[in-house]
Amino acid sequence: MKISLILHVVIVISKLRLILSISGLIFCTLSIAQNNPIGITYHNVTARYNGYFIAKEQIKEIEQTIFDRYEWDYNHILPVFPQFDTTTSRSLETQLQDCIEKASIAIQRHPESRWEDDAYILVGKARLYGSEFPEAIETFKWVNTNGDDINDQHRALINLLRTFTEAKEYKNARAVLEYLDKQEINVENKKQLHLNKAYFHHVMEEYDLMVQNLVEAEEMMNRGADKARVDFIIGQVYQALNFDANAYSYYKRALKQSNTYELSFFTKLNMAQVTQMTSNSNIKKVRKYFRKLLNDPKNLEYQDRIYFEMGQFDFKRGDLAGAIENYKLSVASGKDNRQKAYSFLKIGQIYYDSLRNFQLAKNYYDSTIQVLPKDEENYEEIKSRQEILSEFVEHYTTLQTNDSLISLSKLSDDSLEVLLNLKLDEMELAYINEQEAEKKRKRKEKLTETNINSFDEENLVTINESISGTWYFYNTSEISRGQAEFTRIWGNVELTDNWRRSTRNEIRETEPQVQELAAVQDPAAGKETSKEETEFDREGERSRLVAQIPTSESQLEQLLGEIEVAYYELGNIYNFKLNEKQNAISSFNSLLLRFDSSEYRPEVLYQLYLLYQPMDSTQSDKTARQLLAEFPESIYAKLIFNPNYIEESKALLEAYKKVYKEAYLLYDNGDYQKSLNQIDSALINNPQNQFTDNLMLLKAMNLGKIDGIYKYQYELNNFIRNNPDSELLDYAKVLVKASEDFQINLYSSSRAKFIKNFDDRHYFILLYSPKPELSKSLPEIVQTFIEENSLDLNTGNLVFDEGHAMVLVNEFDGKATANDFIKLFDSGVDLLSEFKGEKFYPLIITRENFEIFYETKDLDSYLTFYQKNYP
């Protein structure tokens, strides 16, 4: 019975296995086919939950890694998406490749599944994060063209917008953006579109459009960390646009939703900045709030940022002294070089823009560049300002110092003695104060009740006093901070007698920050000085001061000559480098007032004529009349007085060059008399110009061949005497010394030699015929072009030679960026179309070659150089 039952069970199981095998075979057969419900379901399910699912999770991990690695700089408006570069892409290469392979499984093994387009989008995103922008662009374009689902097509285009933005193809990005604005898209895609549009507008510095799109996206987002960060960014943009009430509202939203301490901390800081200050009580509340943040142990690593924001708060209220003090405390309180640089920069800007202390401004800009990371967005702009200030301060100091010395030289002996004693008293008092400060510092070193860490204006010693108001040893956070600061300065020293003395020199050598900060205030920092000195060397200082005062006419003339040059150089720096037109006018007017026969007078009058044009046409016309009256024969006057002068002069110059070429050919062939006749005919019938000396020298060479060596030397000496300013003067002297050598090609030897240093900074120049209508219109056209393309560049207008004036645009950090600008300028085909028949030369040139070019006026040589080196 049992055996029979067992056999029955075995038979049933065997039949079931057979049925299941047949069913599985049928299902597999049907599933492989694409055109039946079972096959479609199989491929959709398998594609989604195998390759696509894994690839999607990997993309999330990659995006989180990029997010975590990005250095969020809360001093600037945060980007909507964390930015990445090729270094980041290379570090993610393995994960990105694996993601592409997994997504490819869903594409290759399950073609025509519902998840094929989604898998392609994941491949495109992996290419994007791998900085493979061309491949990413092609992938997203393929989905848009061949995708079956309209939502997937829209999603691909949104990612294409992001890719074009990262690839800096802004024109294409804007085209995609404008196309998507016309489409009907679902809510999720619309949210992503607004975020990507905001990211694009941020890159383009279009902050109004950025905040509009962020507000649209924020309304579609669910509560959480992402929404908190978007609210924070909206607050930052509103704050930058001076809509403080709106900024406060969104900061408040961000604070409610933030789940990270960092975002909450910076939100609180920014809220303090945009709080409406309607009374003194509100100001006190904000200050109390800042003190509360400083005393919170959790904010120890953020103290530099808190002090920086306190400086920003004081600056906004007009309290410059308080702002400077807090910026200095920010520098002393942290180790983040980027934050130190921001604080140094703010102090430098205050000293330059508000306090007009250019020496201190220059010193703080120097300190900024020392610590500012080179990847900072405005690094080149800040470095350029630092370099300009170095040049500016040199001339400004010359002006101030020489004026003071000249004033002292005019005093009577008694008055001079009084002033010297007052100055020496001031210096002695400063010396005594310094000695007292040093003694005080030594006493404080012996007291361990408080750990000092703040700035002192006199010597920039770092001091950090407890703000809590409670006794130091009752405050555990202050004790921890003091222990950490002690270890940083002194190290883990053994508790022995005189431990400080044995390590003091070593410590001073390992404290570059203190030395650097001292150098900001005292350019002589770093020089060895004896702190043991107790007496002020009054006589030595008196001798040093007296030695600088001019006592002879030659010394006085030298100082005045330096002042004249300083005014001229300061005017040019204000005009072309700092773009401070009013200050340029003031400097140039001071030059004209003090030095009425200055060699710079005609050029300065012409620059004033141009500077006044956009702001005071009456004064511009008055300056033009003054230039015409005083220097009617100068090139600057002719540029204003005779619109046809350049054309006439240019035609005569070309005629002289043609005569010279033919006459030299005759000379070279031995037909000296015919060559001489041709030169005489040209000189008799036409006035002199800048090429006349070439013909005169060739005439002397012909006479030498005809009448012998004596006549040759006689004519050469006449040439030297009659043409003292000729560029051929040295050449003529060489011919006198070695009269037998007549085989030198005169014209070729005088050509300029340009330098192939294309890493140097570049200028853009537009040479044109200096007609009044062109001189007035072209600078405005170039300036408008720059503004329309949102470029941060400066323009100026210069006379080049009798045949050309130029618009100068500065400056570019290298050949590549200069090339990009000139291509952009050339693409604006209609810019110069209204000036039919005029000849323009748009060129780029290194700063070094510009000096050679402007000095030699050799346009032909530079055009040849340009064609060879700027294809």
Image: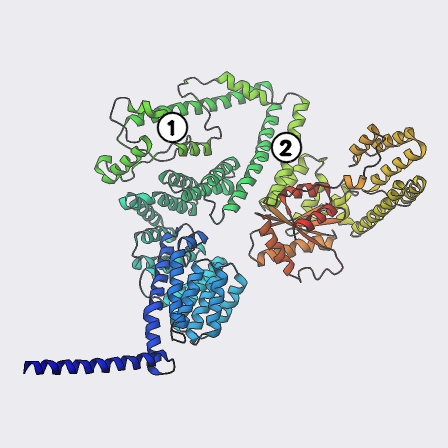
Q: Distance from label 1 to label 2 (Cα)?
A: 41 Å
- The residue furthest front is 3
622 horizontally vs 104: left or right: right
Residue 68 sits in quarter: bottom left
**Foreground disc of the pair 1, 2:** 1
Name the residue: 33% across, 36% down: 464
Q: Secondary structure at mark 1?
A: helix
Q: Is residue 356 at all visible to an observer of this figure?
A: yes
Mark earlier in primary sequence (1, 2):
1
Q: Is residue 208 at all visible to an observer of this figure?
A: no
- Image quadrant holding the N terminus, namely bottom left
Question: Would you place residue 453 above or below residue 836 in this image?
Answer: above
Three-letter amino acid code of the residue under disc 2: Ile
Whole-percent x and y of residue 415?
57, 21
Report the residue marked by disc 2. Answer: 563
- In this view, the residue in front, 556 or 491, is 491
Whole-percent x and y of residue 347?
45, 41
Whole-percent x and y of residue 63?
37, 59
177 horizontally vs 463: left or right: right
Label 1 environment density (alpha carbons within 10 Å; few <14, some 14–19, many ≥20): few
Question: Would you place residue 246 above or below residue 449 in this image?
Answer: below
Name the residue: 69% across, 59% down: 832
Three-letter amino acid code of the residue under disc 1: Arg
Residue 303 sits in quarter: top left
Name the residue: 65% across, 38% down: 568
Report the residue marked by disc 1. Answer: 508
